[in-house]
Image: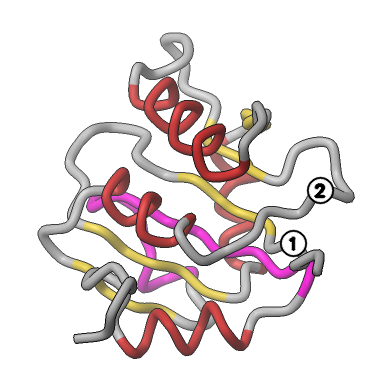
Amino acid sequence: MLKHINPLLTGDVLALLADMGHGDELAIVDANFPADALAKRLVQLPGISATDTLSAVLSLLPLDDFVAAPTAAMDAPDGRPALYTEFDRMLAAAEGRQIPIECIDRFDFYDRTRAAYAVLATGERRLYGNIILKKGVLRI
């Protein structure tokens, strides 16, 4: 255990976050997502929700402020999922400003996940519990 580090951030996750560079993307995906088939680097977080994982990651990962939308989610056929409202709230709290979520086609989301630096596969069972984050820089 480490002080001030969310215990969901395992050594594997911490190493991935530290090794990512500016502009690299991290996908947090739900239990239905084909993560094993798409990920270059995969960490399994079974039983952990996408929102708990997102909260833990956002406690350390700065989002890219050089792009209009440093996050992306899957465009749902029945409108915007309620889960995205939770994502919105968490992103704003972490960054101190509203962060737009770009909704993209399912297959475009798969392609972005395939190209992502890493994938965190959660146990999230709510549909569309997937989000991609683009890493930013720390301003000192």
Residue 91 placement, left or right of 34:
right
Q: Which mark is residue 136?
A: 1
Magenta region includes residue 108 = no
Figure check: 109 above or below 69: below
Give percent across and percent down for residue 114. 59, 66
Name the one closer to the observer, 60 or 100. 60
Q: Quadrant of the N terminus?
A: bottom left
- Name which quarter of the figure residue 72 lies in: top right
Q: Is residue 35 above or below residue 66?
A: below
Is residue 32 within the magenta segment?
yes
Magenta region, residue range: 22-38
Residue under pointer 2: 65
Q: Is residue 20 left or right of residue 118?
A: right
- SS class of the residue under badge 1? loop
Q: Which residue is at the far left?
A: 47
Q: At 46% from the left edge and 69% from the top edge, which residue is drawn?
A: 119
- In the image, 98 versus 113, the foreground residue is 98
State the residue at coordinates (39%, 51%). 54
**Callout 2: SS:** loop
Q: Earlier in the sequence, mark 1 or mark 2?
A: 2
Q: Against 137, is 123 above or below?
A: above
Q: Position of residue 71 (x, y in %)?
A: 64, 43
Q: Residue at x 45, y 27 (%)?
A: 89
Is label 1 in contact with label 2 (beta carbons under 8 Å)?
yes
User: Residue 117's spot in the image, x, y percent?
Assistant: 61, 75
Quarter of the image for residue 18 reads bottom right
